[in-house]
């Protein structure tokens, strides 16, 4: 799999967006390498407009119609690219100026403020947001951790020594986990520095809403912490508070508990074995944090 992606890149046929182009022509076309699921292509058009075409993979978690609904939920809470046109499996987005947070992590507080504002979009229940806006229960039921620890592929990666330790930790953290999920809100689901654009020290756009759902902001917080040098973690906490988030003293532990679910999911993905070994290293760090 190219560049350790979940899905192969799709070929772009300009005829796909002929209706959007009209009498304009494509001056330059370049594939955007970030993102692991869909294919994103930056186009410079003959009238000077720059856009991004997204070609959704066959097994993509989202669709243009779903992302339009997510955009309507977000409103002006945080900046996101506008969808200019779309079909069943493609969309044209406005091109937003900025550099990735990955390249300038000193602005992590601004990203944390965006999480705080997202957390204020309250929803009725936890689950997947459909194209129509309904929220449906996740297919793993009420016990995600339990179902994943029973998964044969996960168990193979974890080995016999880690599983009882993890089961013990999860049992002892049951009350805290229940509290974390008490108030669902709109959650990005992949809030890492490669999906956040920064311009003049502020977030100019949060990209790629494929994994967005009704869940807990601690998933986004955990993702941001995991992908940011610890020297910036204090500023992330400050950014959350500035954005209006009620930050408890155990916020880092809460984020780690939720982020652990992502590491389990990665072990069942099509990502490379090399990548999955790095998830095991993170799981070992999680065990060290909670196994007192």
Image (cartoon, rainbow, N blue to C red):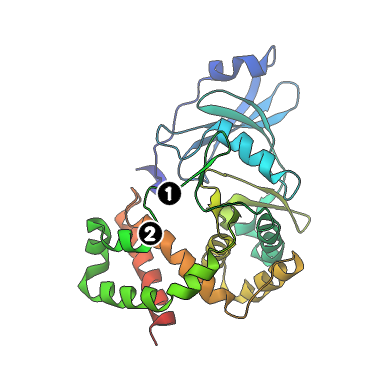
Which residue is at 36% across, 52% downward?
140
Q: Secondary structure at mark 2?
A: helix
Point out the image quarter for the N terminus: top left
Q: State the image quarter where residue 30 is shown.
A: top right
Q: CA distance from mark 2 to mark 1?
A: 9 Å
209 with respect to 258 (left or right): right
Q: Position of residue 95 (x, y in %)?
A: 69, 37
15 with respect to 59 (left or right): right
Closer to the camera in the image, 180 or 43: 180
Q: Position of residue 193 (x, y in %)?
A: 59, 57
Q: Is residue 114 visible?
A: yes
Q: State the image quarter where residue 184 is shown.
A: bottom right
In the image, residue 291 sits, relative to residue 192, either above or below, namely below
Residue 53 badge: none
Which residue is at 52% across, 33% downward?
63
Q: Is residue 30 visible?
A: no
Mark 2 vs mark 1: which is more N-terminal?
Answer: 1
Residue 144 badge: 2
Closer to the camera in the image, 181 or 164: 181
Q: Are marks 2 and 1 in contact (CB under 8 Å)?
A: yes
Q: Secondary structure at mark 1?
A: loop
Which residue is at 54% across, 52% downward?
125
Q: Position of residue 47 (x, y in %)?
A: 75, 21
Task: Kindly identify which residue carries mark 1.
Answer: 138
Q: Position of residue 251 (x, y in %)?
A: 58, 74
Q: Residues within 10 Å of mark 1 (few under 14, many from 20)?
A: few
């Amino acid at each position: 799999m190219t560049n350790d992606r979940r899905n192969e890149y799709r070929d772009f046929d300009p005829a796909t967006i002929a209706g959007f182009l009209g009498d304009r022509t494509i001056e330059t076309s370049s594939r955007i390498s970030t993102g692991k699921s869909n294919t994103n292509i930056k186009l410079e058009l003959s009238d000077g407009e720059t856009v991004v075409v997204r070609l959704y993979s066959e097994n993509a978690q989202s669709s243009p119609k779903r992302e339009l609904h997510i955009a309507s939920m977000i409103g002006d809470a945080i900046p996101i690219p506008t969808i200019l046109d779309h079909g069943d499996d493609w969309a044209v987005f406005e091109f937003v100026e900025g550099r990735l947070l990955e390249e300038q992590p000193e602005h992590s507080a601004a990203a944390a403020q965006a999480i705080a504002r997202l957390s204020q979009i309250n929803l009725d229940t936890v689950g997947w947001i459909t194209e129509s806006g309904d929220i449906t229960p996740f297919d793993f039921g009420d016990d995600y951790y339990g179902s994943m620890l029973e998964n044969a592929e996960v168990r193979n990666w974890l080995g016999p020594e880690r599983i009882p330790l993890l089961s013990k930790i999860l049992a002892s953290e049951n009350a805290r986990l229940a509290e974390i999920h008490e108030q669902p809100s709109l959650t990005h689901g992949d809030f890492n520095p490669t999906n956040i654009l920064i311009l003049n020290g502020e977030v100019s756009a949060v990209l790629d809403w494929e994994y967005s759902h009704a869940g807990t902001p601690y998933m986004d917080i955990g993702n941001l912490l995991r992908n940011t040098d610890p020297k910036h973690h204090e500023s992330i906490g400050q950014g959350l508070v500035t954005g209006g988030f009620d930050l408890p003293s155990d916020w880092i532990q809460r984020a780690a508990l939720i982020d652990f679910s992502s590491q389990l999911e990665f072990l069942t993905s099509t990502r490379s074995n090399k990548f999955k070994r790095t998830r095991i290293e993170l799981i070992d760090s999680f065990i060290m944090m909670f196994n007192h």
